[in-house]
Amino acid sequence: YLQYIELLGIRFPRAQFVHIFLDTRDAAQSFHKCWHQGPGRLAFLWKQAGRSGRSEGMKLGSDRYMEVAYESLKVDAEAS
């Protein structure tokens, strides 16, 4: 729903948004299996969507929009 952040922010003025994003290379590899498009094309689309979402989110301000890299949330299974 990245393309709708601004609209959702207007419709729900107290809403807060967390954009959890995946590394472009991992996303392209993962979605390549589902969408049957070349990884280069998927990487381009993924980056484009991410930039658009970031732009929309920044309009809301840091009190309503936050970005988190998915990789920073992963837990090392062997360390657990």
Image: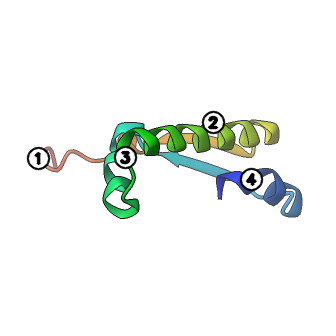
Q: In terms of sequence position, does the residue under pointer 4 or pointer 1 come before the other?
A: 4
Q: Of circles 2 and 3, which is in front?
A: 3
Q: Earlier in the sequence, mark 2 or mark 3?
A: 3
Labels 2 & 1 near each other (Cβ < 8 A): no
Q: Amino acid at mark 4?
A: Ile
Image quarter for residue 10? Answer: bottom right
Q: Which residue is mark 1?
A: 78
Q: Mark 2–mark 4 contact, CB under 8 Å?
A: no
Kindly identify which residue carries mark 4: 5
Disc 4, SS = helix
Q: Counting residues from the N terminus, which is met first, the one under dot 2 or under dot 1?
A: 2
73 vs 46, left or right, is: left
| Circle 2: residue type | Arg
Residue type, numbered disc 3: Gly
Badge 1 element: loop
Q: Are marks 3 and 4 in contact (CB under 8 Å)?
A: no
Q: Is residue 4 in view from this perspective? A: yes
Distance from disc 2 to disc 4, alpha carbons, whole Å, reads 12 Å
